[in-house]
Image (spheres, rainbow, N blue to C red):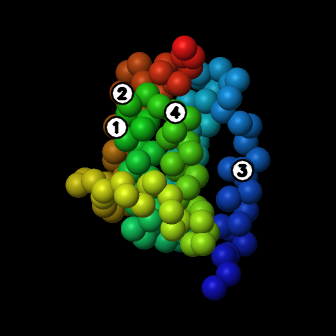
Amino acid sequence: MSDSPKLVALRKSLAAEPAAEGLAPETAKQLAHGAIAKILMAIESGVCPLGDWERRCLAAAITSLRGGKTNEARTRARQALWPDENRRNAAVSKFPPRPGMMTLPELKREFAAALAMPGRGGSRDAKTT
């Protein structure tokens, strides 16, 4: 089964964004927020399904965002759009489904809660030791 043109376009738009390395923390945070929001909107509009894989990736992305790991959050979110053949050995496949992050409304609620957390989303990723 081939992917829809809208899904391919979404993958390309997220891949065309700048690499996280060397970005200002606020810019990296905005890119992570944008990636998660775009994917949630794509699922809501029917561009891609909310299957087990997508649920795990988005839950992992939101959890990373809550932990202030914006680069990891962005990576996990983008993995939700991976083609089937790239999913087999990914670490996120072992990420357990989280209670309260099973449906699209729950994921959207948790994403909004993560966005509302003060002082998160970039501070840890910006540090290099």
What is the quadrant of residue 115 in the picture? top left
C-alpha span from label 2 to label 4: 13 Å
**Amino acid under label 2?**
Met
Farthest bottom residue in view:
1
C-alpha span from label 4 to label 3: 16 Å
Residue 77 versus residue 9: which sits nearer the camera?
A: 77
C-alpha span from label 4 to label 1: 15 Å
**57 in relation to 70, above or below:** below
Q: Residues within 10 Å of mark 1 (few under 14, many from 20)?
A: few
**62 in relation to 58, above or below:** above
User: Earlier along the polypeptide chain: callout 2 or callout 4?
Assistant: 4
**Amino acid under label 3?**
Ala
Return the x and y of residue 101 as percentages of the image width and height: 31, 54
C-alpha span from label 3 to label 2: 27 Å
Q: Quadrant of the image for the C terminus? A: top right
- Disc 4: which residue: 70
User: Earlier along the polypeptide chain: callout 4 or callout 1?
Assistant: 4
Secondary structure under the numbered disc 1 in the rendered image:
helix
User: Earlier along the polypeptide chain: callout 3 or callout 2?
Assistant: 3
Image depth: mark 3 or mark 2 in front: 3
**Which circle marks residue 113 in the picture?**
1
Q: Quadrant of the image for the N terminus? A: bottom right
C-alpha span from label 1 to label 3: 26 Å
At 43% from the left and 36% from the top, the residue drawn is 65
Q: Are marks 1 and 2 in contact (CB under 8 Å)?
A: yes
Residue 114 falls left or right of residue 75:
left
**Which circle marks residue 117 in the picture?**
2
